[in-house]
Image: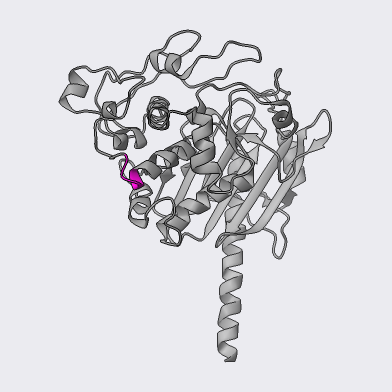
Amino acid sequence: MNFRLIFLLFGLGFGTLAAQSTSIQFTQEDGSVQTMEERMAAEQTKGAALVVLLDGQVVLQENWGWRDAENQLPVDNQTLFQVGGMSQPVAQFAIMRLVSDGVLNLDTDINEYLSSWKLPTNKITSARPVTIRDLLLQRRGFKFPYKPDGFAAGATLPTHLQLLNGDGPAKNPPVVLKKDINKSGDNSFAPVLILQQILMDYYQQPFETIAQEQVFAPLQMNSSFYASELTADQKGMLAVGYGPDKQRLADDYKRYPELAASGLYTTAHDYALFIQALLDATAGRDNRFLSQELAQEALAPSNNDDAMLVNRNDTNLFWGGATKGYYTQFEADAVDHRWVVVAFMNDHINWSFNGALRWEGINYAKAQMATGQEAESTQSGKR
C-alpha cells in the first residue's frame, strides 16, 4: 500500500465541518450533507474513532459504531485497534532515543550494533555499509517482495530470527541487500525488522518489553502494546476486524509476528500522544526523549520527501496502516507543530472514507485555531 499516494490523492479535501458542531458531516457533490452515521451505513463500516489535539490538548474525541457489531459492543475511548504500518514509527522512535543518548550513530555500519544476527555481507555492503539512517529512510534498495498478511489463530508463528533468515514458518524471503539504490520509497518491511533486532541486541530484552519501557510508559501511552497474540482482557477491548467483504474476520484479527512492522495495538488517543511528543521535541518544548536538533533532523524531508520517522510533505506529517480488517491514519502540523489528527477504523483498507474523516478532523483543528486567533484579536482590541 503506497501511503504517499493515498495522502496526496485524499489530502485535498472532502467537504467542510458543520459550523459550531463537534458532529462530523460530509458535504456531497450535490450540496447535500451526509452525517457520519449515514456515511458509515453507506460504507458498511462497523466502527470508527477520531481524536484531534490542538496545542497538546484534546479538542475533539469522538467514537462511532461498534468494536464488535455482532455483540453490540460500542467503540469507546479505550477501544484498541490494530494499526499495521503505523507500528513502525514507534519502533523507530525507540531507535532515535538511543541515537539521542549517543549509544547509536546514524551513519555507522549496522553490523557493529548487531550480535544475534548480521546483515549478510556481499559486494554491495562491502563497498558501502548499510547504516541506521539508511534503514530509517528505507533506502538502499531493500526490495522485500512480501507484505505481512497475518497468521490465523492457532498457527505456529515464526520467531524474529526466523523472519530475518526467511526460515519456516516465516512466509517471507531472507533479509539481504541485492541491489543498491540510494533512494527511498521501497515501502519495505525489511529495514524495520533489522531495527527491531538492533533494539533487542542492545537491551537484551524482548521487543515488547523495550517498547513498554522506552516508549509507552514515558509517553503515558497506557493502552498501547506490541503483540502477536492477545490475552483475553486485551481481546475484550479490541475492535474486531471486518474484511473486504464487510464480514467479521474468522479469527477476529490476524496475528502479526513482525512486531515492529505491524504488531502495534493502540487507541486513537494514545497514538495522538505519540505524535504530540514528536511535535513537542521538534518545537523545542520537550527534550526529555529527543533533542530538538535530532527531532528536527528526524522529521525533515529527505529522499522523495520521506523523513526518518514518518512521511511528510511541505506542511504536514502523515502515515497510515493497513492490516486485514483495519485501516488507520494520522496527520499532523509540521510547520507550527500545533495540531494532530488520528482516525482509526475496523474497516478493511477503506482509505477514501478514512481519508475523508481525517480531513474533517484537520478542518476542525484549523477552525479551532481560527476561533482562538479571533478571540485573541478581540481581547487585544479591548485593551
Q: Position of residue 346 (x, y in %)?
A: 67, 33
| Residue 25 visible in this rendered orientation of the protein | no
Instruction: Give the residue at the far front of this rendering.
Output: 204
**Residue 56, position in %: x, y?**
56, 59
Q: Nearer the viewer, residue 217 or 46?
A: 217
In the displayed structure, 254 sits above or below 369; it is above
Query: Looking at the image, which residue is at 44% across and 54% down?
Result: 288
Q: Residue at x 37, y 54 (%)?
A: 291
In the rendered view, tell whether residue 33 sits above or below residue 187: below
Left or right: 16, with 232 as reference point = left
Is 239 above or below relative to 148?
Answer: below
Residue 123, percent across and down? 18, 18
User: As drawn, is 192 to the left or to the right of 263?
Assistant: left
Q: Residue furthest top?
A: 168
Q: Residue furthest bottom?
A: 383
Q: Quadrant of the C terminus?
A: bottom right
Q: Answer with the quarter of the image where residue 186 lies.
A: top left
Q: Residue at x 43, y 50 (%)?
A: 289
Q: Which residues are magenta?
A: 99-103
Q: Residue at x 37, y 14 (%)?
A: 174
Q: Is 353 colored magenta in this rendering? A: no
Q: Position of residue 205 (x, y in %)?
A: 47, 29
Q: Is residue 347 left or right of residue 190?
A: right
* Quadrant of the image occupied by residue 369: bottom right
Q: Nearer the viewer, residue 283 or 46?
A: 283
Decide if residue 383 is in sight here. Answer: yes
**Magenta span: chief secondary structure:** loop
Instruction: Quadrant for residue 125, please give it.
Output: top left
Q: How many marks?
A: 0
